[in-house]
Image: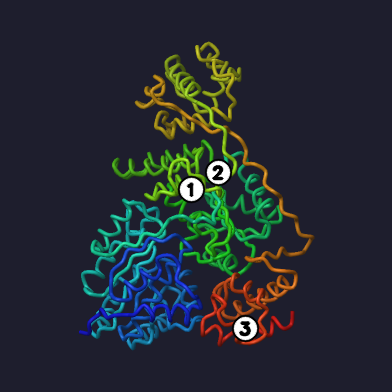
Amino acid sequence: MIAHNTATSSQTCHAILEEVFGYAQFRGPQQAIIEHVANGGDALVLMPTGGGKSLCYQIPAIARQRAGLGISIVVSPLIALMHDQVGALHEAGVSAAFLNSTLSSEEAYQVEQRMLRGDITLLYAAPERVTNARFLALLDSLFERGLLSLFAIDEAHCVSQWGHDFRPEYRALTVLHERFAGVPRMALTATADDLTQADILERLQLQAARAFVSSFDRPNIRYTIVEKREAAQQLLRFIEREHEGDAGIVYCQSRKRVEDVAQTLVDAGVRALPYHAGLDNRVRQDHQNRFLREDGVVMVATIAFGMGIDKPDVRFVAHLDMPKNIEGYYQETGRAGRDGLPAYAWMAYGLQDVVNQRRMIDESPAGEEFKQGLRGKLDALLGLAEATDCRRVRLLAYFGEQLGDGAGYRCQNCDNCLNPPAVWDGTDAARKLLSTIYRIQQSSGMSFGAGHVMDILRGKTTEKVTQHGHTALSTFGIGAEFSELQLRGVLRQLIALGAVAVDAQAFNTLQLTEHSRSVLRGELKVQLRESVSAPASRKSKRAGAGSAVIKAPIALDGEGLVRYAALKAWRAEVAREHNLPAYVIFHDATLAAIAKRAPQTLDDLQGISGIGAKKLEAYAQSVLRVVSLT
């Protein structure tokens, strides 16, 4: 059997970067990762979404293929991602293919034969296929001939029960280590806390792998979290003020909410589409294709949408319902601004979000230890939402990273840094609220929901309060100075702290817990941000009826904008012909650089980032023609 490890020079990897992908320099830790893996090393790669993870296995795969070491297998959980990545590699002149359920049996057979002949550099397949007996037999044949070069396991957090998107089929990938000793393996993910990282290493038997942990910071993303009040209208105002004509993703918890919010946006003139598992497969695929291939589409979706979405120009990700944990929040918000340009992560959350998430954990059939882990992750997210200090510092601290000097650092690109919130001591309000829950249960042996408890505390003589004789309670009216909004904030904190439980089996009634005592005794302080709406943002000038908003990623003069618009129209036609997303042909940043340079000759196109040798050969004349006509 041929040895799998061979020296691959730094110059070789850099030449591939320039020649194939059209980039002059590696980003961040890319070079160290690529050279380590190209030379046969195992690796765990944690790199934020948009940080360039794909190149970390694509360049080693090309380098090792050129060195005669054969094919690289990319384990990917998503058909759409496979299709787009293979299309992008073809555009760059790299031999790549995928094996998935979209192929006929004859097409799959042809791919397998090409694979056995060594005609493919990268093959993408789902974990279920990679670990089935037929495919393993094909890998055996390659391995025996020394033509199995690399395994790249993408979205590796799926292997961990502590990850936010656990998929049991990933567990079977341990067979790669057991069956193909000596073939380098790399696990890649954008999101993993220390517990998840340890689980990945153990489950994939990568304990000896070199870990490359990049900064989790995405400085181009502005984080904003607002208190939920008519969330759909809040979202609409956010889009109208900040993101008219931009591509975006809106996450909702339920299918019905997805449908309702999408319709609200459409009625307001936003190009919005729904996406959830309940839609017909063809409709769902059509909506995803439109989002990827058209400009300015807003996708309203459940979390069934998003993993592996490579669209670089998503300008905002909005959450209308709170995610389950920070990993999910970070992964989902990371789909904005993959091109490195300014983008927004916006979330609205409220008391019901806290109640719903707590209920889902409590009603889960999982063991108590696992539930405790989930509660801890939820509490961390609640802490981020209620924070009055820098959100970015909080977010990165969760992943074990310190930003600046830590406490007191201001990123100046989150809502708390740009508009520091006022803070008030909610301890007195919390004690009064807990006392009211206690007095209600003591007097009638019954429990009630949040609205009724707050009505009593504020001294409101509603029909329900009067009917149950709760005007006679000693706590009736003792919290009249607090607004309902303030008390909802207090209650959110108490639920987050575990000082109040919500009984989902009894109409979401409130219950005291063993942790209530520490608040009642004044041992635990409750610090709260003032309940205020998000500050009004500068409203963009609305385009005239039927006109399009042209936004370039770099500053362009009037003539440059005309060229940029013409190049985008040309790119859209090419993308339709190739059945690929437009950004696979050229990124917006590449088109903008062309528009700014206004090239007249082939030499003028040399050195523009994102134009590799194959793309220069394929598209140079067309690009020059478009530029000459504007």
The answer to whether residue 256 of the structure is visible from this angle is no
The residue to which callout 3 is attached is 604
The numbered mark, 3 or 2, whose residue comes first in the sequence reads 2
| Image depth: mark 1 or mark 3 in front | 3
- Seen in the picture, residue 347 relative to 282 is either above or below; the reply is above
Q: CA distance from mark 3 to mark 2?
A: 43 Å
Amino acid on which the number 1 mark rests in the picture: Arg
- x and y percentages locating residue 288 in the rendered image: 55, 65
Looking at the rendered image, the quarter that the C terminus falls into is: bottom right
Amino acid on which the number 2 mark rests in the picture: Cys
Q: Quadrant of residue 598?
A: bottom right
Q: CA distance from mark 2 to mark 1?
A: 9 Å
Instruction: Please state which of residues 84 and 527 is positioned toward the viewer in this rendering.
Output: 527
The residue to which callout 2 is attached is 417
Label 1 near label 2: C-beta < 8 Å? yes
- x and y percentages locating residue 464 in the rendered image: 57, 21
- Label 3 SS: helix
User: Can you tell which mark lies on residue 451?
Assistant: none
Q: Quadrant of residue 627?
A: bottom right
The structure residue drawn at horizontal position 38% and vertical position 39%, both measured from the top left corner, is 362
The residue to which callout 1 is attached is 392
- x and y percentages locating residue 528 in the rendered image: 51, 31
